[in-house]
Amino acid sequence: MRLRQDIPNWLFTLAGIAFPAALILMWWLVSELGLVRPLFLPGPGDVMVEGLRQAREGILWEDASVSIYRILAGWLSATLVALPVGILMGNYRLIEGALEPLISTVRYMPVVALIPLSILWAGIGDAQKILILFLGTFFQQVLMVMDNVKTIDRNLIRAGQTLGFSNGEILARIILPAAAPGIWDTLRITIGWTWTYLVVAELVAANAGLGRRIMDAQRYLATETILFGTLFIGFLGLLTDYFFKRTGRALFAWQRQR
């Protein structure tokens, strides 16, 4: 059997539904049989009731709108800087040599450790939260964009040189179109990372947001609120991922989909 054997679309979709459904069933059985105390693992029904309460009272929509704004602002600001820097690093070895050691070092620094500095630099408002999301995304993103550009087929560049293209024409007409599908996948992956930093970003002095709601629930041992908030963030991330996948298929229909 081949590693990626073609299967019908309905079977592919069914597999994606059946496995999460089986996990939820196991979760329900564990809670119903009392194998774990509700304080540590409330049942799916309790989590759903908490979510409905938040939606009915408007808490969920307020938190979600604030968090989505912060995610988009942090990710877009990181992307607007990472794209040109990553493209330059992928095309010019001197720029890669100058920037790659520093960026590679900073990307291993824990973002949580930078919270005190971010407060000093940006205060405790939205700017501080957006800065944390920027720092959590940019350094990984710029290196991935660089690799997307570096790993294109070099024969395409040689063909452009044979046709007499200038360096600018090779970049605009060959390198960027060839690297675009990979860069799009990088954007899809890195916005997922931005979602994972949301709770960290809303750790300090946030008056609204999904991450802030989770942190408040921790103080009162409201486990159902913690679980619902975490699952809802995952759901929003899944919607984001689906949007990027569908858009990528439309933008790069010429590329064989994997």
Image: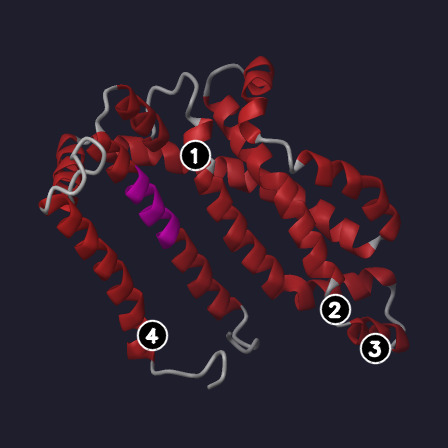
In front: label 1 or label 2: 1
Query: Element at badge 3?
Result: helix
Among numbered discs 4 and 2, the one appearing first in the sequence: 4
Q: Which residue is mark 3?
A: 159
Q: Badge 2: how crowded within 10 Å, few (<14), some, or many (20+)?
A: some
Q: Is residue 27 magenta?
A: no
Q: Dot 3, how many residues are within 10 Å of its Cα: few (below 14), some (14-19), or many (20+)?
A: few
Q: Amino acid at mark 1?
A: Leu
Residue drawn where x is 66% and y is 44% of the image: 82
**Quarter assignment of residue 243:** bottom left
- Residue at numbered disc 4: 12
Q: Which residue is mark 1?
A: 198
Q: Is residue 257 above or below residue 236?
A: below
Query: Which one is nearer the viewer's eye here, 224 or 72?
Result: 224
Q: Secondary structure at mark 2?
A: helix
Q: What range of the chain is rendered magenta?
A: 230-239
Nearest to N terminus: mark 4 or mark 1: 4
Q: Which residue is mark 2?
A: 174
Q: In the image as oriented, which residue stretches furthest toward the left? A: 32
